Image (spheres, grey):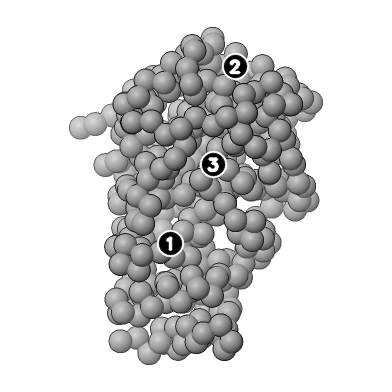
């Protein structure tokens, strides 16, 4: 038993009236001891469920992210500042995802994109990004971190896969099933980035208090360029059936955006989750600009992100949001996004 961890567990697990928040340093230590499994399984399970009940603070998330940075994978800087999209690791169970397609369109427009995640994760065990990529003929598993870095530099896309690149975090996955609830690690994964250079982080979330935690943690960690998206199932995908609520921070200046899809001519309904093969068929049509259930949601999402990208770069473009929707549609219809998919397939070489 770790007596040091026991002391931290007592702070967060003392109940609603006497529990205490951890300092950034204490949260860092607790996360390191869990990742190294210096704490016993009983201690780790107790900490995760107690911390969920207490709810993490921004300072605690900052400390936990410090531990992830120190012990987890960090892609070296590339020649352009990427966008890191943080999707829930437990995937999707109700609505059709767009993550890989958004990445391909943005990369085709010259914006490097990084994603991260693992396999099906308890307790939701929804459709994860890795399976979506595989259905498009892109298998990120089995690559070294340096191979991912090379693909990121040359193709403009990268995926950090937990079982290969962060086995310490992967080893904590069974606890999610055993405690039967999402632990605070689920919140951490929505703001953590496996990239060491300048970047823009995009964080999906469901509950508004989560956004406040992100902002507090980013302020402590000096992260000045980020977006928060109240997206579909906590993802970075903008919904079509409701007003998109987005927070943007450039150079520390935070701004709130509310965008209604119908105001820009997009249908006010979200696409339900499909079987993976059906999703892949619809995705491949959308990537060619052909009629597909995913085409309009993809233009809505990628147009928005293309528009925001000019605010986090040295670009002198003054494109409007409407202009960016036109650009997104053109990237699909002229075959540029499809060419990016082919380049990615060719860039991932197997022995």
Q: Which residue is mark 1?
A: 182
Residue 140 screen position, x and y as percent:
33, 37
Does the rendering let one see residue 141? yes
Q: Which residue is mark 2?
A: 329
Q: Looking at the picture, tell me which residue is in the foreground, 153 or 300.
A: 300
Q: Which mark is residue 232?
A: 3
| Alpha-carbon span between mark 1 and mark 2 | 37 Å
User: What secondary structure is found at the residue carrying circle 3?
Assistant: helix
Q: Residue at x 49, y 23 (%)?
A: 294
Quick check: 137 left or right of 74? left
Q: Residues within 10 Å of mark 3 (few under 14, many from 20)?
A: many
Q: Looking at the picture, tell me which residue is in the foreground, 287 or 260.
A: 260
The answer to the question of whether label 3 and label 1 lie on touching residues, with beta carbons closer than 8 A, is no
Q: Residues within 10 Å of mark 2 (few under 14, many from 20)?
A: many
**Residue mark closest to the camera, 2 vs 3:** 3
Question: In which quarter of the view is residue 7 placed?
Answer: bottom left
User: Does residue 52 lie above or below 322 as drawn?
Assistant: below
> How many discs mark residues in the rendered view?
3
Residue 120 screen position, x and y as percent:
32, 48
Q: Residue at x 42, y 73 (%)?
A: 49
Q: Which mark is residue 99?
A: none
Does the rendering let one see residue 165? no
| Alpha-carbon span between mark 2 and mark 3 | 22 Å
Quick check: 333 left or right of 323? left
User: Does residue 67 lie above or below 2 as drawn?
Assistant: above
Q: Residues within 10 Å of mark 1 (few under 14, many from 20)?
A: some
| Alpha-carbon span between mark 3 and mark 1 | 17 Å
Dot placed on the residue nearer the N-terminal end, 2 or 3: 3
Quick check: 313 left or right of 171? right
User: What secondary structure is found at the residue carrying circle 2?
Assistant: helix
């Amino acid at each position: 038993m770790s007596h040091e961890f026991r002391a931290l567990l007592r702070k967060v697990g003392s109940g609603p009236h006497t529990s205490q928040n951890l300092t950034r340093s204490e949260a860092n230590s607790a996360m390191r001891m869990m990742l190294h499994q210096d704490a016993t399984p009983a201690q780790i399970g107790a900490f995760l469920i107690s911390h969920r009940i207490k709810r993490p603070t921004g300072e605690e998330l900052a400390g936990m992210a410090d531990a992830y940075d120190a012990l987890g994978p960090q892609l070296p800087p590339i020649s352009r500042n990427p966008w890191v999209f943080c999707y829930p690791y437990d995937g999707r169970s109700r609505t059709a995802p767009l993550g890989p397609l958004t990445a391909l369109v943005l990369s085709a427009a010259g914006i490097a994109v990084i994603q991260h995640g693992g396999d099906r994760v308890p307790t939701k065990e929804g459709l994860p990004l890795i399976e979506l990529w595989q259905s498009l003929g892109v298998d990120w598993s089995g690559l070294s971190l340096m191979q991912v870095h090379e693909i990121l530099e040359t193709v403009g896309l990268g995926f950090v896969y937990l079982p290969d690149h962060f086995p310490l975090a992967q080893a904590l996955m069974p606890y999610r099933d055993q405690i039967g609830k999402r632990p605070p690690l689920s919140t951490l994964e929505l703001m953590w980035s496996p990239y060491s250079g300048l970047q823009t982080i995009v964080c999906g979330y469901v509950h508004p208090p989560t956004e406040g935690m992100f902002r507090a943690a980013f302020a402590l960690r000096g992260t000045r360029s980020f977006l928060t998206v109240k997206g579909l199932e906590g993802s970075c995908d903008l919904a079509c059936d409701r007003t998109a609520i987005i927070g943007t921070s450039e150079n520390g200046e935070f701004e709130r955006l509310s965008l209604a899809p119908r105001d820009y001519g997009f249908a006010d309904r979200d696409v339900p989750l499909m079987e993976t093969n059906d999703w892949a068929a619809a995705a491949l049509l959308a990537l060619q600009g052909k009629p597909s259930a995913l085409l309009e949601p993809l233009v809505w999402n990628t147009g928005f992100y293309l528009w925001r990208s000019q605010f986090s770069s040295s670009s002198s473009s003054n494109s409007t949001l409407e202009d960016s929707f036109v650009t997104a549609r053109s990237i699909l219809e002229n075959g540029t996004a499809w060419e990016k998919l082919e380049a990615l397939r060719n860039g991932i070489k197997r022995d």
